[in-house]
């Protein structure tokens, strides 16, 4: 599929959650990168269980990360915050 043929809208429910686990770190991720038109942007949805840690503390020299935190209870989103790090 070429970049121009990619749709502007995707249904993220069509993309399966992929489990990740390494020691005490773990998450479920949906990698949306191949489904968006951006060429220099990685897009991943990450779901964490209560108290779960996705990865150790780290930093990047050549890229930014953007976080949208959604605090959910019974799958209803109660609050969210966007953080740039």
Image: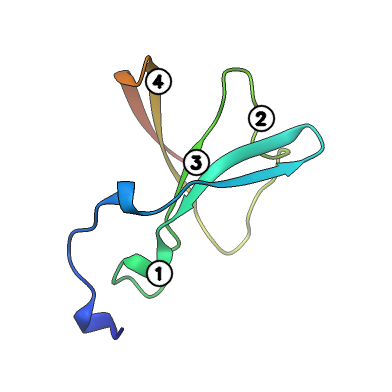
| Disc 3 to disc 4: CB gap under 8 Å | no
Identified at 29% across, 86% down, the residue is 2
- Would you name the residue on which mark 1 appears? 34
**Element marked by disc 3:** strand
Q: Which mark is residue 17?
A: none
Image vertical order of residue 2 relative to residue 38, above or below: below
Place of residue 15 in the rendered image (x, y in percent of width and height, measured from the top left): 38, 54
Q: Which residue is mark 2?
A: 53
Which residue is identified by label 4?
A: 71
**Image quadrant where residue 57 sits:** top right
| Vertical position of residue 76 compared to residue 59: above or below | above
Q: Residues within 10 Å of mark 4 (few under 14, many from 20)?
A: few
Q: Nearer the viewer, residue 44 or 15?
A: 15
Other-residue count near label 1 (Cα within 10 Å), few / some / many at <14 / 14–19 / ≥20: some
Picture layout, residue 41 above or below residue 55: below
Residue 6 locus on image (x, y percent): 23, 74
Question: Looking at the rendering, which quadrant does residue 38 occupy?
Answer: bottom left
Q: Which residue is mark 3?
A: 46
Placement of 31 over or under 21, stated as above or below: below
Q: Which circle's residue, 1 or 4, is located before the other in the chain?
A: 1
Coloured how? Answer: rainbow
């Amino acid at each position: 599929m070429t970049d121009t043929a990619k749709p502007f809208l995707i249904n993220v429910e069509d993309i399966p959650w992929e489990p990740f686990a390494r020691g005490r770190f773990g998450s479920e991720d949906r990698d949306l990168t191949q489904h968006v038109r951006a060429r220099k942007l990685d897009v991943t949805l990450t779901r964490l269980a209560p108290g779960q840690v996705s990865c150790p503390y780290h930093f990047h020299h050549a890229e930014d990360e953007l976080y949208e935190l959604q605090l959910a209870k019974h799958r209803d989103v109660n609050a969210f915050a966007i953080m740039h790090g």
